[in-house]
Amino acid sequence: MECDLSEVSIHPSSVISSEAIIEKGVSIGPFCTLRGRVRIGANTHLHSNVSIGIESGIVEIGEGNQIYPGCVLGGAPQDKKYKGEPTRLHIGNNNHIREHVTISLATATAKGTTKIGNNNMVMAYCHFGHDCEIGDDNVFANASQLAGHVQIGNQVNVGGVCAFNQFVRVGDYAFLGGYSSVNKDILPYAIAQGNYAVMRATNKIGMERGGMNAADIDGLHKAIRIIIKGSSTLSEGLQRIHDECTPSPAIEYLIRFIKESKRGLAI
């Protein structure tokens, strides 16, 4: 274990790997276990009964995170193809990861890293599968479950008990209603709900709270309505957006998201 014991707090009941790197201001509560190559960033707090890493994996956790009892971070991916490769879990800064959340290492057959960004609230009993990529400033309500390779953008709100198929993408500022089952991509700036989830409206409130200006919100509202209500094909919808909507970075992101969809859109 690499740390200055005068600058950290480690409960004597916790078991810390000899390969762990623990930065100043870290607090590790009772009955925590750190296995293998684990780095804990400054001022992160492991409350109690937290398990991080396995002997074959690499886990990097940034600064200022709050990790609550029962979390298992950097466990082996739930994938039969995993054979102990040194894959990674990277968690950014200032996340709140509540009770009994599980986040898996990546597999060697994809990019090799499961990524969690900054300033996320992950409520109790959520699961993020191997190779997921999560952006910044998202909220995941209790018991939502992400299969492998799911991509979530920034400023996304996910209601409780939502389920995501493998390889689904959710764009920035999207809102998912509770109990939704998501098997296709959710557009940025949209509201979706249902089993299976479909996009029903524009997430105007989320964009306003995120500080977007009124002109961009109005333009996105028009573009999303074209896709989900006003066109018979995606090609027709994209052409109408090009013809009828004022160009902006947000509109360009929306168009790019649509064109890059591999699973199809939830419409």
Image (spheres, rainbow, N blue to C red):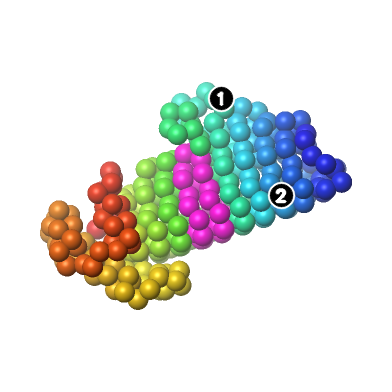
Percent x, y of residue 87: 54, 31
Q: Which mark is residue 84?
A: 1
Q: In which quadrant is the C terminus drawn? A: bottom left
- In the displayed structure, would residue 15 be above or below residue 197? above
Going by the numbered disc 1, the residue's amino acid type is Gly
Numbered mark located on residue 234 in the image:
none
- Indicate the quadrant containing the N terminus: top left, top right, bottom left or bottom right: top right
Q: Is residue 144 left or right of residue 44?
A: left
180 vs 62, left or right, is left
Q: Which mark is residue 42?
A: 2
Residue 97 seen in render: no
SS under mark 1: loop
Q: Earlier in the sequence, mark 2 or mark 1?
A: 2
Q: Amino acid at mark 2?
A: Ala
Q: Around disc 1, counting alpha carbons within 10 Å, would you say few (fewer than 14), some (14 to 19), or many (20 or more)?
A: some
Instruction: Name the one closer to the observer, 154 or 73.
Output: 154
Q: Percent from the top left, x then y, of residue 230?
A: 16, 66
- In the rendered image, residue 119 lying in the magenta stretch gets the answer yes
**CA distance separating discs 2 and 1:** 29 Å
| Residue drawn 49% across the image and 33% down it | 112
Left or right of 84 in this view: 200:
left
In this view, 107 is above or below 230: above
Q: Which element type, helix, strand or loop, lies under badge 2? A: loop
Task: Look at the magenta stretch and give its main secondary structure.
Answer: loop
User: Disc 2, disc 1: CB below 8 Å?
Assistant: no
Residue 157 part of the magenta segment: no
Magenta extent: 114-141
